[in-house]
Each structure stands twice: as C-alpha cells, then as structure tokens.
Amino acid sequence: ISEGSGDNIFIVKNGKIYTPPTLNNLKGITREAAIELAARHGHTVIERDLGLFDLYTADEVFVTGTAAEVAPVTKVDGRPIADGKVGPLTKVLMGAFRELTQTEGTPIY
C-alpha cells in the first residue's frame, strides 16, 4: 500500500504511527503537517512499507490530504479496523489539524 486516491495513508499499531515512505507516492503537505502534529503530541511517525495485512490488523487507520484533511478510515475492504470506530489518536490529530488550519490558515470566502 502506498497511498489512497490523492491521500496519504497512516496506520496506528501498538501506539506507534506508520506511513509509507514518499519515494513513489504523493509528498503531501497535509502529510507533513500530520507528522509534525504527531510529534508535538509526543508521537513519532515511522516510515516503512505497508501491506494489506498491516491495514487489516491496525488499531487505527487515517488518511491525510488537501480535501480529506485528517480523516479516519474505519473499514478496509468491508472489514472493520479494530472496533470499527474512530481511534483516539486519529481524533487527536483531527482536532490538532483543524486548530492549525483555523489559527495559521488563510480564510477563503
């Protein structure tokens, strides 16, 4: 797995965040912001190749992108991720990203 259709993908497993390296995929601005926000909240993001097994067995999955911002993924191929609910770390990053865009972003009217 390298990316979604215009989104970067992240998984959370045992408290660690993983995302594929950007060698052959989107070098997203939102991806970089999410990595920085994770660091601000005490989490390191590890870049490594991911496969379907990683997605199926993840504690949380989320994607990042200009349109998606930080968005939870609760099912993959019809299979629930963990309990099928938005995970706690994903919620933290969603809130942190929203705060970032409201305080440092430029309003568009």
Image (spheres, helix red, strand yellow):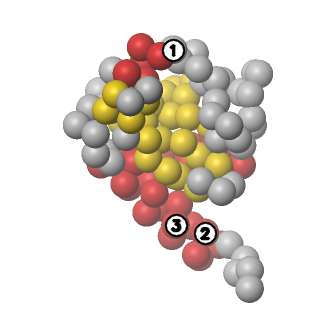
The amino acid type of the residue labelled 1 equals Gly
Residue 76 lies, in percent from the top left, at 43, 30
Asked where in the image residue 11 lies, by quadrant, the reply is top left
* Mark 2, secondary structure of its residue: helix
Three-letter code for the amino acid on which mark 3 is drawn: Arg
Please tell me which of labels 1 and 2 falls first in the chain: 1
Q: Which mark is residue 101?
A: 2
Q: Is residue 8 above or below residue 1?
A: below
Write down the residue under mark 1: 51
Q: Marks 1 and 3: in contact by CB < 8 Å?
A: no
Between label 3 and label 1, give the one nearer the viewer.
1
Residue 53 as seen in the image, left or right of residue 2:
left
Q: How many labels sit on residues?
A: 3
| Alpha-carbon span between mark 3 and mark 1 | 29 Å
* 48 horizontally vs 93: left or right: right
Q: Position of residue 96 (x, y in %)?
A: 47, 61
Distance in Å between CA atoms under marks 2 and 3: 5 Å
From the image, state whether disc 1 or disc 2 is nearer to you: 1
Amino acid on which the number 2 mark rests in the picture: Thr
Residue 103: image x %, image y %? 59, 76
Image location of residue 13, percent across then percent down: 34, 27
Q: Disc 2 vs disc 3: Cβ atoms closer than 8 Å?
A: yes
Q: Is residue 40 visible?
A: no
Q: Which residue appears at 51% of the width and 14% of the height?
A: 51
The answer to whether 4 is drawn above or below residue 63 in the figure is above
Quarter of the N terminus within the rendering: top right
Residue located beneath label 3 in the image = 98
